[in-house]
Amino acid sequence: MTGEIKNLDGDKALAAPADDGGGAAGHGRKGGKNKLSLVPLIFLIFFEVAGGPYGAEPAVQSAGPLFALLGFLIFPFIWAIPESLVTAELSTAMPGNGGFVVWADRAFGPVSGSLMGTWKYVSGAINGAAFPALCADYLARVVPAVADGGARVATIVTFNVALSVLNYTGLSVVGWSAVALGVASLSPFVLMSGIALPKIRPHRWAATAGDKDWKLFFNTLFWNLNYWDSVSTMAGEVENPGRTFPTALMSSVAMTSLGYLLPLMAATGAVDAPPEQWGNGFFADAAGTIAGDWLKYWIEVGAVLSSIGLYSATLSSAAFQLLGMADLGLLPRVFALRAPIFNTPWVSIVVTSLITLGMSFFSFNNIVAAANFLYSLGMLLEFATFVWLRIKRPEMSRPYRVPLRLPGIVVLCLVPSGFLVFVMAIAGWKVYAISAMFTAAGLGVYYLMKFCKVRGFLKFGTVDGEGLMYECHQGRENVSV
């Protein structure tokens, strides 16, 4: 059975196998071999978003224990859960690779799809570039020679190459590696929370910072509970997406939220330290105070393992995004090429790996802030896509459907959208300028690809008959594959 997919701007339509909630339709991979099952998918989402409570310390530093605990208690309900619900519905309705790019393309046309791809890819690539350098920083605490010079460069390159090879071997391997890394990086925090119980003094939770930095506070919450939709780019590789995606997303939301909240409650309640001391890495110091140096070192090792999981998951989602964009005809056909044995998008993996490797050697605070801004633009477009498709395509098959009528859907999207606008409003002029440059570059890439299609300079289309895409986004002919 086939279900028609049509661009809403009147461009070329296509027909795709309808999904019954049990299989991957659209431009996913044929067959069920090596597809992602529930448990690996939960941990891949976990590493797309968090990787553990590492990095949550500035929330305490900027506002104090009370606001940090309230933030990580409340923020999942106003941000993480709405984003996860949107991702679950749209990923099961259109379970092909490319995720949010496919959704925007289907709702508003190829220009919107291309812009969404630019915003999310740049944000993800910059985010991923931080992890090899972060891993080198943590290793330098144990091996000082890694702190700078050739040893640091070698560490970053080795980290990048090793995880690129891991991604080349397939998402099933990446997924089960994420399970092992997740257990290893979370274990010391479970122990710390248990050991801290008799030492907790609840009155310490009510402390606040004297000089509050609300910009840092909200950016910390936003950064640590972001990217729930990144896994959508791999929807075509998921086993039984109609059932697996909603369960995996909600399980990961619960695991991630508790993974922040419980260690924060344990450390702030058991350690008498002023908010000013809660800089990055303070969890290790707190663990040392609570249980001894052995747990401190374990958490530092866990930070390295978390960085490995974070980079691997980010590389996977970014590579499959490029594959999905090639399937849609937004990028050349070469980005959809799959490796002959492992069936992975090897060109997209290599390109993404090289981009993140190059960025790993730069200090780019303003660019990181611009990446957050671009991600926010992408999320506003994503929420608009969700509402628009509910209005214009109510008949679309949705194996998982958010159990709300249109007014509830609007409210669900408006609350996190308001926070996005707030985060964007407090950005500086440099962030606006850099974001405008990336957006203009994204539009330039779209029209360059369109020119190359017309002139025949590059090949666009299916790869070995697999995948569905809009060849030129022109005409109204239905295409079945």
Image (cartoon, rainbow, N blue to C red):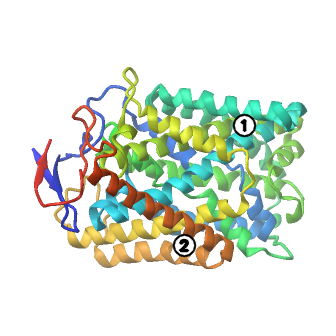
Q: Compare residues 118 and 273 and report the one nearer the observer.
A: 118
Q: Compare residues 462 and 372 and report the one nearer the observer.
A: 462
> Where residue 100 sits in the image (x, y, percent)?
39, 56
Apparent side of residue 362 relative to residue 174 in the rendered image (left or right):
right
The amino acid at mark 1 is: Val
Viewer can see residue 294: no
- The local secondary structure at tag 1 comes to helix
Q: Quadrant of the N terminus?
A: top left
Crowding near the residue tagged with mark 2, few <14, some 14–19, many ≥20 C-alpha atoms within 10 Å = many
Relative height, residue 90 to residue 19 (above, below): below
| Residue beneath the point at 36% across and 31% down | 35
| Residue beneath the point at 61% across and 79% down | 425
Q: Compare residues 474 and 76 and report the one nearer the observer.
A: 474
Residue 420 numbered tag = 2
> Where residue 181 sits in the image (x, y, percent)?
61, 33
Answer with the quarter of the image where residue 294 lies. top right
Q: Compare residues 379 and 158 and report the one nearer the observer.
A: 158
Apparent side of residue 275 relative to residue 341 in the rendered image (left or right):
right
Cα separation between marks 1 and 2? 30 Å
Q: Quadrant of the C terminus?
A: top left
The earlier-in-sequence mark between 1 and 2 is 1
The amino acid at mark 2 is: Leu
Mark 1 and mark 2 residues within 8 Å of each other at the beta carbon = no
Crowding near the residue tagged with mark 1, few <14, some 14–19, many ≥20 C-alpha atoms within 10 Å = many
**Circle 1 residue:** 304
> Where residue 457 sits in the image (x, y, percent)?
33, 46
| Residue beneath the point at 44% across and 77% down | 414
- The local secondary structure at tag 2 comes to helix
Relative height, residue 412 to residue 80 (above, below): below
Please give the count of numbered marks on the rendered protein: 2
